[in-house]
Amino acid sequence: PVVWWLRNDLRLEDNPVARAAVAEAHTDGRELATVFVFDPRFLDRSNYGRVTDPEFKKSIPTRKPIDFGNRKTCALRARFWLQCVRAVGEGIANKGGKLLVCKGLPEDVFAGLPRGSLVVCQGEPVSPEQTDVEDNVSAALVRGDSVLWRKWGAMSLYHRKDLPFALGESPASYTELGATLGWEDIWSCPDRASDATQVRDPVAAPAQLRPAPGGLDLPGLIPEAVLQNDAEALRFLGYTEAEIAEAMGQDVPPGGEPAARESMEQWLSKQTCTGQDNPQTGPQPVFWDLPVGSGPPKTGHDGLQWANLAGPDGWLRISHYMAVGCISAREIFARAETCPNFNGVAHRLLWRELHRLNAIKWGRRLFWLQGPGYVERPWSWDAVHVEAWKTGNTGVPYIDACMRELKQTGWLAYKGRKTSGFYLVFGLGVDWRVGAYHYEDVLMDYDVAMNYGNWVVVAEVDKHNRGAHGFSTVEEIADWKREDIAHKLTSEMKNDPTGDYIRRWVPELRNVSAQHVHAPWTMTEEDMAKCGCVIGKDYPAPLGGPFNLNIEEEVNEDKPLELRVHI
């Protein structure tokens, strides 16, 4: 048969891989199998490193042992993933096909195919691990006189054949990438040159699928009754009873292509409402630490919607669907092209494109401690600090609120992700990979290029001319960055002066006054007694602190360190 191997392209609309597999089956009159495989290497707990290379055969000779780790995918994200898989299975069934869902190593699963099979999949060149899986599958198929076709698909906004540069030779900065692709000024307007690189139009879903082969019994096939029950499926995938109970007790967004499209349509319907698309009518948010170019306009419409990046609630909130391919970047781009905030949509999609291109260019260097910039500096692996950060018990309210929201929902706004990461790396001196790997575990919208690409920028190891050179201890680095951390926390205090976000996620501080809720270490004993929160007893003293937050200080938006890097 022809086999459409679904991966992070769990949709039928705008899926060139699906169309290629269906076309091949129709042309030759062959049966069409559709298969998704839950690979335990990307679910189970493991130490940080290339899970597809357990014997380190593909590592550099100077690789040092690593003894920190966590799951690759928490139970909450696995539950969402299951819903997305079931949804695309329903779509396939409506077109005459049948999705087979397995658990196992894809190379073992596809070794069970009849000889002479053709497997078609979307390649994922941004991930060395996923590329390893593709290589393993290809080798297993060859042994059975079968073959693997890897397609570019539509995970990226631009098709590789349309790019005006070779993969691995992409522009080094966001501004340069925008200009190279023909955007006149992606920081301020959506205009493009007449000869700009075009984004391909979305393609329609296949009208009908070829019949599925009868009696195809692949290794690791998940029974239908198990697949349809979240708790049973999580148990089948290897999650503990405690993990399952926690995940089943948490809210999870509806999964699948129809839910993704409905979310997009709801967002689009709000973009014509003045209160939704003109945030300048309210108090001006603080934009320090955001890649905002020259900043938002002081008056009038803000097509880039920077105020949404400064807040805790995000904007499109569709990244979790994009991560598993329930909707494509091309479809989002096309649907938003006529909306008044298209500039903001294009801007964010191009950031995603930059990270994907960087990941392809950097390869495994993206995951090194020294980063793509080969930056050498001291690091800490203090287990107490790491656990406090992961669980939201650092004693720094904004950081704790962020980390608790992340743990409970799988979501964290852009600014929260970066500020929490900056604090871990420079406030506590912890190896940035610890934070990146934790995000990989718990983020509902985990995307390898976006996650690790943002972390190397936050940790200042993306370029050799950046970062903490010349320091001999993590304490020296922390002292160097103390003012920056305080400045970031002051920005959050100005954006949320009443502390509503903190109170929502850190109930220990619910009765602390607005004056102290962002910096409870400033309370006197009388203040602590009055609100019933004693620092060091009811809520931790600040690790790496205390920090000097001054709400009266004018935040200097001409000094954005992150901004200089991004541009």
Image (cartoon, rainbow, N blue to C red):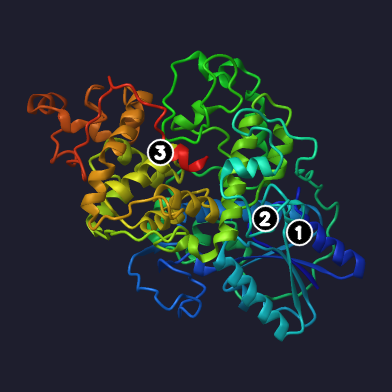
Q: Which mark is residue 561?
A: 3
Most extreme residue toward the left, as rendered?
525
Q: Which residue is mark 2?
A: 9
Q: Residue at x 66, y 59 (%)?
A: 167
Q: Quick one: label 2 or label 1, which is nearer the N terminus? A: 2
Quadrant of the rendered image containing residue 330: top right
Which one is in front, 95 or 305? 305
- Residue 161 is situated, as x and y percent measured from the top left of the image, at 76, 56
- Residue 462 is situated, as x and y percent measured from the top left of the image, at 46, 53
> With respect to residue 540, does 367 lie above or below?
below
Q: Quick one: label 3 or label 2, which is nearer the N terminus? A: 2
The answer, for residue 109, to whether it is visible in the render is no
Graded by Cα atoms within 10 Å as few (under 14), some (14 to 19) or many (20 or more), the crowding at tag 1 reads many
| Disc 2 + disc 1, Cβ < 8 Å | yes
Secondary structure beneath dot 3 equals helix
Which one is in front, 508 or 52? 52
The answer, for residue 269, to whether it is visible in the render is yes
Quadrant of the rendered image containing residue 558: top left
Q: Amino acid at mark 2?
A: Asp
Q: Which mark is residue 17?
A: 1
- Residue 453 is situated, as x and y percent measured from the top left of the image, at 50, 52
